Image (cartoon, rainbow, N blue to C red):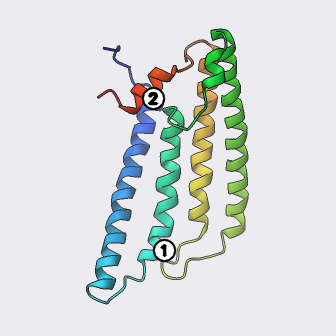
Amino acid sequence: MSAVHKKTWIDRVVDGLDLIASIMMVVLTIVVFGEVLSRYVFDLPLVFSNELTLLLFPWVIFIAAIAVTKNEGHLSINFFRSLMPKAVQRWMFAFSKLVMLFFSVYMSFSAYRMGENTVSQVMPVLRISKTWLITSVTVSFAAISLILIYQFVMIVLGKLEVPDEEEMLDDLDHGH
């Protein structure tokens, strides 16, 4: 049995975001199911469902991306890294965080600028600015950037170890 992991404030925030993404996914499922039922059973389409789905889906995906980053759930190729000495593995792990950080900051900044350009565009049925679509990208990549900075600092301080392949497979099971 592994030691019990004490939850940090980042763990609690990400758990809260996971809950929000789960609730949004339930709402999204209900809206899509309601649309299908309404359209094909009652021949009465829900006019708002398409736009609400368009708004909710990116938020679900990008909020979930925050948890994926925090939990090292993203796809990675560790074969060559695992062949290196532990010290080199640690710096390769840190370097990969910096590459991800660069991409995340760039995405957050680009999405913010794109949001500025769409602020006057309004969705016809819900009357909500299309900026809400882009804001999901901005918010998620800003949060991912903060997590990556935290992880990089923890790697440099020696408080975050390079995950082994076996640990990563065990994490997929979520301790069950």
Say above or below: 5 vs 71. above
- The correct choice, above or below, for 125 with respect to 14 in the image is below
Q: Within the image, what quadrant is residue 6 found in? A: top left
Instruction: Check the picture and name the quadrant holding the C terminus.
Output: top left
For badge 2, the amino acid type reads: Trp
Assign a secondary structure to mark 1: helix
Q: Amino acid at mark 1?
A: Glu
> Which label sits in the foreground, 2 or 1?
1
Q: Position of residue 79 (x, y in %)?
A: 61, 24
Q: Position of residue 155 (x, y in %)?
A: 61, 18
Q: What residue is drawn where x is 35% and y is 31%?
A: 174
Q: Residues within 10 Å of mark 2 (few under 14, many from 20)?
A: few
Give the labeled residue for mark 2. Answer: 9
Q: Residue 56 placed where, x, y %? A: 46, 62
The residues tagged by marks 2 and 1 sit, at their Cα atoms, a distance apart of: 34 Å
Element on which disc 2 rests = helix
- Nearest the viewer among 151 and 87 is 87
Comes first in the chain, label 2 or label 1 = 2
The mark found on residue 139 in the picture is none
Q: Which residue is mark 1?
A: 51
